[in-house]
Amino acid sequence: DADVTQTPRNRITKTGKRIMLECSQTKGHDRMYWYRQDPGLGLRLIYYSFDVKDINKGEISDGYSVSRQAQAKFSLSLESAIPNQTALYFCATSEPSGGMYNEQFFGPGTRLTVL
Amino acid sequence: KNEVEQSPQNLTAQEGEFITINCSYSVGISALHWLQQHPGGGIVSLFMLSSGKKKHGRLIATINIQEKHSSLHITASHPRDSAVYICAALGGGGGSNYKLTFGKGTLLTVNP
């Protein structure tokens, strides 16, 4: 079984709809991240969470919100989707701080299309 | 300007060739992460290294902290190595040791 799972894997929606992307992990990691990937731009950080009560904005958080329901679950919401949020979204996890232990492990991605 | 630059952007090779992908970064880092993304989209961690060299099968990663440069080598390349290879610099400590700054990736195609 995959250590980091994302649902749904693909989603097509319309402008203005509310969308939630979910991430679950069985790695026991405290830190979780949401990224988006756009062609030619690489991966960019949307939000990150160091534990259930510690949630922080990344470099492109506008238009997004998150919820850390438990250590193992981190959800990303688009309150009112717009076409330029069409992208590939990745969840990732890592161990707490400490040199090499910050290796990040990625989920399989969610391809979101906003029409 | 991206703080992590990869070269080349695209690379086509024949099966069996030795492959090198380069990564230069302008920020202070604590480690460098090499990732592989297959056409299906999933991202797999290959290496994380802060000094010297690491080897896993046909993959070798090196890093020179003084020169702010890392390379990923693939020996005896195979069509199944075809993927996008991404390097990412892990922040240099303090409050930023979680932060990854990503390169834009190198698309490798290995022809049979």
Image (tube, coloured by chain):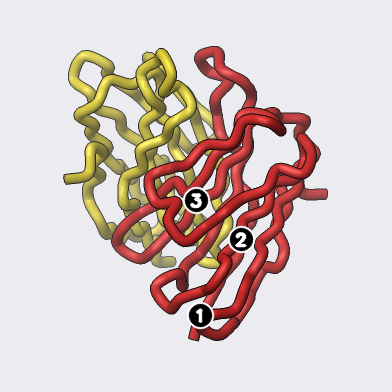
Query: Which percent across, then down, holds residue A97?
Result: 56, 17
Amino acid at pointer 2: Ser
Q: Of A62 and A29, which appears nearest the observer?
A: A62
User: What is the secondary structure assignment of the residue under circle 2?
Assistant: strand
> In the current view of this chain or complex, which residue is farthest to the right?
A1
Q: Is residue A100 visible?
A: yes
Q: Is residue B16 visible?
A: no
Query: Which percent across, then down, holds residue A43?
Result: 41, 51
What residue is drawn where x is 63% and y is 57%? A108
Mark 3 lies on residue: A35
User: What is the secondary structure assignment of the residue under circle 1?
Assistant: strand
Vertical comparison of B5 with B41: above or below:
above
Q: Which mark is residue A77?
A: 2
Badge nearest the viewer, 3 or 2: 2
Chain B: what color? Answer: yellow
- Horizontal side of B59 relative to A96 (left or right) equals left
